[in-house]
Image (spheres, rainbow, N blue to C red):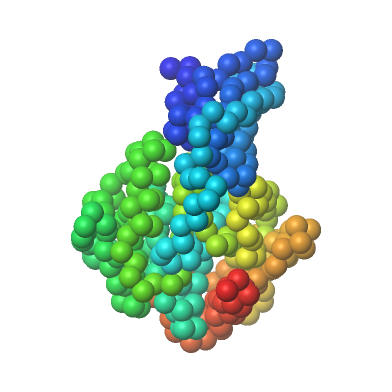
Amino acid sequence: MTDLDDFAARLKTLTDGRASAPKVKDGVLSLALDVGGLSSQQREAVTAAIREGGLKLPGVTDVRIAQTAERPAERSADTKPETPRGPRIIAVASGKGGVGKSTLSANLAVALQRLGHRVGIVDADIYGPSQARLLAGEDLKPQARDKKLIPVDSRFGIPMLSMAQLVDPGKAIAWRGPMAGNALGQLIDAQWDDTDLLIVDMPPGTGDVQLSMVQKHKPIGALIISTPQDLALIDATRAISFFTQAHVPMIGLVENMAGYACPHCGEISDPFGQGGAEKTAAELAMPFLGRIPLAIDIRTRSDAGDPPAAGEGPHADTFRAIAQQVADWLAKQA
């Protein structure tokens, strides 16, 4: 299979069969996209994903998308839109892996619960799930009722679902985009009962799972995390751009691994730099929510399934302060 064939197969999945066969001539990839019945938000998200994928093909220097409207709208003009159901969704995302996104998601869920929200958490990092370990839920197996999964309760009283609870420990999940998208749908469309806020721990990057999220599940907002170093911030900016193009409001940017305190002398060093995320947030005119230090206590407690936000102390205070800003932002959306 050629690169173009592989792109065409992925394109069919991304657009639900709405796109024509792509063609490349003189470095220009062209195709037609049926946008009938899609909202402006959906159109922008799909075209952005097509353009990004097309420009990665060898020899392609430009992508041209002809938009048509051949499909009739699924809802007549005088039909009232459906009232949204289920909990409000916050996507916690990053441009690359290894920057602490899952640790932030778990601690944010715990801290928001302590602030009075009825919080659930979905581990949408299909290929590298971490929440079952972070929230001590590895031995909990979800059941199903009426073809819907029933979230399990972590020992912190937070209902959760993770692929780590649905597959054998250590087993690789080698799925193409459609299977990952279907798995995401089953996790989010579960029986969340009275949960009013769903924290979704996204996989890194801007791929199929992210596109399924913004198209089908409509997050109320997105929170981006990055380390202070330039390479991580470049990728974080891409993630911000993705959600912005999809018209998902940005809650803010969090800087992780910001300063290491020597356990012997107390001196603070900055192995990953300092202030990069705050500077980026200012440049993009978005809120900066705070810094999380590079601390062995956060690492060891996370590995032990005991998130610092569940206790007391300076690290719990750090996560609580971030959660309070998220709670304040949510209050303004009501």
Q: Is residue 205 left or right of residue 173?
A: right
* Residue at x-position 32% and y-position 44%: 172
**In the figure, 72 relative to 255: above or below?**
above
Outermost top residue: 26
Residue that extends furthest to the front in the rendered view of this protein: 78
Is 56 in front, or is 196? 196
The image quadrant that residue 67 belongs to is: top right
Q: Measured along the vertical axis of the image, is residue 311 above or below residue 196?
A: below
The residue positioned farthest toward the right in the image shown: 283
Which quadrant does the C terminus fall into? Answer: bottom right
Residue at screen point 39% across, 72% down: 195
Residue 212 in view here: yes
**Left or right position of 188 against 72:** left
Q: Position of residue 1 (x, y in %)?
A: 43, 17
Q: How many marks?
A: 0
**Residue at horizontal 36%, vertical 74%?**
194
Where in the figure is residue 287, as x and y percent of width and height? 70, 67
- Answer whether residue 264 is visible to the viewer in this image: no
Residue at (54% x, 28% y) in the render: 70
